[in-house]
Image (cartoon, helix red, strand yellow):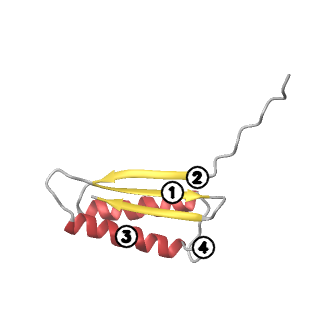
């Protein structure tokens, strides 16, 4: 008889959301990225937080302004690998 195995802790956390291709959508993408990073334990001025927010802000604004196609939204995905300390930021239209 084998001993029961404990659950493996989650080490990769993800956030994904679609937004309208408008200035309001780009602003909301930034605000939700700030909220999610804070929930994951990031703090302003520490560990690349400010750079991550800047990247999400710029890419969201570009997607809303230049990737605008009637009826098409843009999406933001954040993936944080706690073990490796890697934060992946993806924005696409």
Could you give the CA–CA distance between mark 2 and mark 3, rounded to whole angstroms? Answer: 22 Å
Q: Which mark is residue 57?
A: 3
Q: What secondary structure is marked by label 3?
A: helix
Q: Is residue 82 above or below residue 53?
A: above
Residue 21 badge: none
Q: x, y percentage for residue 77?
A: 42, 56
Q: Which mark is residue 12?
A: 2
Tell us which disc is closer to us: 4 or 1: 1
Which circle's residue, 2 or 3, is located before the other in the chain? 2
Q: In what element is the residue under mark 4?
A: loop
Q: Which residue is mark 4?
A: 47
**Real-space Cα distance between discs 4 and 2?**
17 Å
Provide residue 36's location: percent of width, then percent of height.
51, 57
Image quarter where the C terminus lies is bottom left
- Front-most of 24 and 6? 6
Distance Cα–Cα, label 3 vs label 1:
16 Å
Q: Tell me the crowding category of disc 1: few under 14, some 14 to 19, or many 20 or more residues within 10 angstroms, Cα based.
A: some
Badges 2 and 1: C-beta atoms under 8 Å apart? yes
Q: Residue at 36% across / 61% down in the picture? A: 91
Q: Which residue is mark 1?
A: 79
- Label 4, label 1: how many angstroms apart (C-alpha)? 15 Å
Q: Residue at x 47, y 58 (%)?
A: 78
Front disc: 4 or 2: 2
Measured in 3D between alpha carbons, the distance from the residue under mark 2 to the one under mark 1, in whole angstroms, is: 7 Å
- Picture quadrant where residue 3 is located: top right
What percent of the width, then of the height, locates residue 6?
76, 36
């Amino acid at each position: 008889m084998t001993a029961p195995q404990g659950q493996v802790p989650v080490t990769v956390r993800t956030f994904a959301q679609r937004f309208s291709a408008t200035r309001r959508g780009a602003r909301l993408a930034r605000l939700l990225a700030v909220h999610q990073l804070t929930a994951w334990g990031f703090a302003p001025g520490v560990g690349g937080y400010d750079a991550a927010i800047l990247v999400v802000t710029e890419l969201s604004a570009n997607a809303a302004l230049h990737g605008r196609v009637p009826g098409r939204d843009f999406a933001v995905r954040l993936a944080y690998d706690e073990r490796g300390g890697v934060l992946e930021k993806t924005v696409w239209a």
